[in-house]
Amino acid sequence: SEKLRVPEALTFDDVLLRPKESRVEPDDADTATRVSTSVELTVPVLSAAMDTVTESGLAIAMARRGGLGVLHRNMDIDEVVDEVERVKRADELIIREVVTASPDQTVRAVDEMMDEEGVSGAPVVDDDGEVLGIISGTDIRPYLEVGDRDEVREAMTDEVITAPQDVDARDALELMYEHKIERVPVVDTEDRLTGLVTMQGILQRREYDTAARDADGRLRVGVAVGPFEQDRAAAVDEVNADVLFIDCAHAHNRNVIDSARELAAGVEADVVVGNVGTREAAQELVEFADGIKVGIGPGSICTTRVVTGSGMPQITAVAQVADVASQHDIPVIADGGIRYSGDAIKAIAAGADAVMLGSYFAGTDEAPGRVVTMNGKRYKQYRGMGSVGAMQSGGGDRYLKDADEDEDFVPEGVEAATPYKGSVESELFQLVGGMKSGMGYVGAGTIPEFKRRAEFVRVSSAGQTEGHAHDVVITDEAPNYSPD
Ligand code: RVP
């Protein structure tokens, strides 16, 4: 029958990169890429827009290390606006939420307050916000010991060095060196406090020299938005979100496309649209999208393929979309199914410009949720956005046929646990390190060159078994490998 003459579609385990002559040492491989037409990253990795993965904590960590976090949309619009602002403020030169002391507080109260807030000094301001002085641990200690004159007004340094509103890092550092101080309050023309620059903040910005930053030097952040959520899109655009991700399980849908096109036209931010997995879908999206996200059913917690009988193995899906998108110079993001660094670099070989991961990051400290212990091993919760739990707790209409009807869903995801992994820093180091080694095996020093040069070979199931650790008992855990 004609019906049974079907094309083959491949996924990660079906292919390997064919090794090629190389002069590229992994350390020298440059992973710079684009996630959307105007947003560049030094690290081609995104964390998934899921309520057990990306909130401001992980988004800050990702952007500092050159990647991008995409905030999930299981929260109200004002919450996500706060979250965007949190990321945008994280590495700002001028801290805007300043812990202040008042002149008639006791030094003991200020000491406790500074302890609680985790700061080692505070500007002292009057009721109008005018800066009267500055108080630090060193000012307080002797007063705590002696204990007679214990008002802040007595203990503070009142010859306070301030900076004007347009201060830059260089000026601020000069003031700090000249006066041997570690923090400089920023004031308006009437001496009212508008912010604070700290030595620690300046050094921290220097430490993250490959961070993903916008034109004003603030960290970049992505935000997931439903295809029909014009209000959410406008609100996060207003607070300078860098990339909006139209978040839909099947974006090759007329209503979704029409609405997404309108939404994209109304915002300043770049707009990535997904998910899709075919050439025809890509053809539609290249008309208006600034990036295309690929993945129909590959996710670790995703049951779309089993529940609906549809999907597209991820390597073929990425390759099909990239064939079309590359002709229009639109970046492609491979979303879901990545377990190892090798999968990530295979996705790029298939044509993706960047990869998005959920389960890989859900177990880190920076992801929301607490650590639980089962059978003596530590885990964190990880659930699909189309799982019953995620859909019940908010705007999980990604998988709902009718967004108004929030009972009786047909879930397309599961609720699970994933091994606890510690800080995201070492996870990202392993992921990106493995990807760079992959670039070395193919002899490509940059991502665009790698995409041109990479070739696949088809792997049999015997070949796949051979590729994993086999016929041994693993005695020590490797930081980047655990057998499934
Ligand atoms: P993974 O990295 O394999 O854990 O996959 C994460 C991706 O899975 C997400 O970025 C999203 O595209 C998809 N997802 C999220 N929820 C669900 C679901 O409930 N089916 N799928």
Image (tube, rainbow, N blue to C red):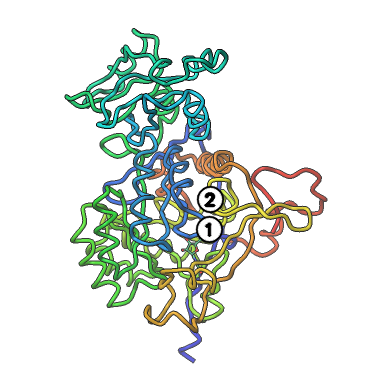
Residue at the spot 30% in from the left edge and 20% down from the top edge? 132
Q: Residues within 10 Å of mark 2 (few under 14, many from 20)?
A: many
Give the residue furthest to the front.
148
Q: Nearer the viewer, residue 95 or 384?
A: 95
- Are the residues flagged by discs 2 and 1 in contact, CB closer than 8 Å? yes
Give the quarter of the image for residue 333.
Answer: bottom left
The label on residue 367 is: 2
Please name the amino acid that badge 2 sits on: Ala
**Residue 269 in the image, given as x and y percentages of width and height:** 25, 52
In this image, 316 relative to 242: left or right? right
Q: Is residue 102 above or below residue 51?
A: above
Residue at the spot 41% in from the left edge and 61% down from the top edge? 75
Q: Is residue 28 visible?
A: yes
Tell me the element at label 1. loop
Q: Nearer the viewer, residue 135 or 318?
A: 135
Please name the amino acid that badge 1 sits on: Thr
Give the residue furthest to the bottom.
1
Whether the residue carrying mark 2 lies under 8 Å from ligand 1 is answered with no
Whether the residue carrying mark 1 lies under 8 Å from ligand 1 is answered with no
**Residue 253 in the image, given as x and y percentages of width and height:** 32, 76
Q: Which residue is mark 1?
A: 52
Q: Is residue 195 above or below residue 429?
A: above
